[in-house]
């Protein structure tokens, strides 16, 4: 399996809160409910969040379902594709920096045919970097706001 790692991103939030959210994708429904209507409209029908899985609709690939296959509290959550054209794994690594700061990184693992590896390596590395950046920008405060 080819592994593509993101840069480490700093998140201004404690590791326990971040892990609680990322290890239970269903919590994203609570966040989505608090987003402005114009933002919700952009993502409507593109993602479904359940307790142990995320289902994404990605054109032109179609539907990709990622199931949680491993949870190591509070440092690691591993998703694997249940419905994907190629074997795919997505790993989120968390490391406590201090009580209110966490270092996060993402890894994409993909089974690539040696003939297509040169064509897809750069886009997959870019995808891992964007995924790592996206984790750092999640609105963790919306989940835990009163």
Image: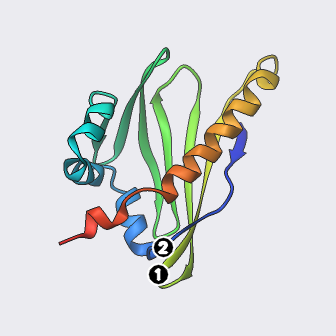
In the image, 40 versus 79, the foreground residue is 40
Q: Residue at x 23, y 70 (%)?
A: 145
Instruction: State left or right for residue 4 relative to residue 90.
Output: right
In the image, 113 versus 95, the foreground residue is 95
Reading the image, the residue beneath label 2 is 12
The dot on residue 114 is none
Give the structural element (helix, strand or loop) at label 1. loop
Q: Is residue 77 visible?
A: no
In the image, 33 versus 49, the foreground residue is 33
Q: Residues within 10 Å of mark 1 (few under 14, many from 20)?
A: few
In the image, 60 versus 139, the foreground residue is 139
Picture layout, residue 1 above or below residue 10: above
Reading the image, the residue beneath label 1 is 100
Q: Position of residue 140 (x, y in %)?
A: 36, 64
Q: Position of residue 117 (x, y in %)?
A: 78, 25
Asked whether the residues under the numbered discs 1 and 2 touch, taking CB atoms below 8 Å apart as contact, a structural biologist would say yes
Q: Position of residue 35 (x, y in %)?
A: 25, 49
Q: Position of residue 89 (x, y in %)?
A: 57, 40
Q: Residue reaching furthest bottom?
A: 99
Q: Earlier in the sequence, mark 1 or mark 2?
A: 2
Give the structural element (helix, strand or loop) at label 2. loop
Q: Real-space Cα distance between discs 1 and 2?
A: 6 Å
Instruction: State left or right for residue 18 relative to residue 32.
Output: right
Picture layout, residue 64 above or below residue 144: above
Give the quarter of the figure containing the N terminus: top right
């Amino acid at each position: 399996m080819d592994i593509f790692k993101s840069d480490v991103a700093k998140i201004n939030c404690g590791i326990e809160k971040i892990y609680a959210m990322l290890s239970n994708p269903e919590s994203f429904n609570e966040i989505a409910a608090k987003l402005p209507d114009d933002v919700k409209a952009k993502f409507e029908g593109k993602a479904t969040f359940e307790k142990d899985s995320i289902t994404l609709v990605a054109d032109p690939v179609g539907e990709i379902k990622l199931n949680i296959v491993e949870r190591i509290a509070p440092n690691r959550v591993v998703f694997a594709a249940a419905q994907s054209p190629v074997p795919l794994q997505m790993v989120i690594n968390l490391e406590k920096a201090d009580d209110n700061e966490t270092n996060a990184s993402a890894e994409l693992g993909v089974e690539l045919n040696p003939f297509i590896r040169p064509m897809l390596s750069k886009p997959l590395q870019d995808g891992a970097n964007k995924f790592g950046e996206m984790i750092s920008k999640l609105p963790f405060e919306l989940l835990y706001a009163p």
